[in-house]
Image (spheres, rainbow, N blue to C red):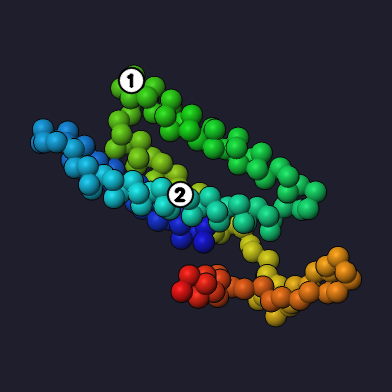
Amino acid sequence: WLIPVQTAIGLLMLATSGIIPYLLGETDGSDPHVKTLTSVFFLFYFLAATQDIAVDGWAVTMLQRNNIGWASTCNVVGQTFGYFIAFTGFIGLKMYGIMDLPQFMQFWGIVFLVSTAIVGVLKKEVQSNSEKGVLLSETVEDGDVETEEELSVQDTYKQMLNIIR
């Protein structure tokens, strides 16, 4: 999930950086294209939320049990730092004429793509229990062992759709 979502975010930033002045109405003096801006930024936020979920899940599988508590701390620190860069950092760069919005979006689109490529090349995944055909088991309070198979992403969505119906 992480690689495709981050790639999509990076490509969307690069694509949007070229048309953002037009969408804001800066190039032709027209009113901002609110519906298109709303659609584009809805897609950004949808992808970012999906990325957040993927990173949280990845952290749980990657960290040792005694370090899992640090996952939320790292998440909060990272998000705070990201907000600072995205808001305060951009305003400072724009105020001093260093970078405008299209350049800022291009830069971060490239950062997303490069960091995604680095993670994709350098980070190797360990095969999950479901890929090994192993069943997960958990002992419940009365001593019985409850066994369930770990579902794939596709099976999880199928199950979710069946529940909704």
* Residue at screen point 35% across, 40% down: 105
Q: Is residue 116 visible?
A: no
* Residue at screen point 55% across, 56% down: 54
- Report the number of discs: 2
Quick check: 76 left or right of 146? left
Amino acid on which the number 2 mark rests in the picture:
Ala
Q: Residues within 10 Å of mark 2 (few under 14, many from 20)?
A: some
Amino acid on which the number 1 mark rests in the picture:
Met
Which mark is drawn over residue 48?
2
| Element type where label 1 sits in the image | helix
Return the residue at label 1. 95
Q: Can residue 138 be seen in this view?
A: yes
* Residue at screen point 48% across, 29% down: 84
Q: Is residue 16 above or below residue 2?
A: above
Q: Where is residue 40 in the image (x, y as percent from the top left)?
A: 30, 49
| Element type where label 2 sits in the image | helix
Q: Position of residue 100 (x, y in %)?
A: 30, 30
Q: Position of residue 128 (x, y in %)?
A: 68, 70
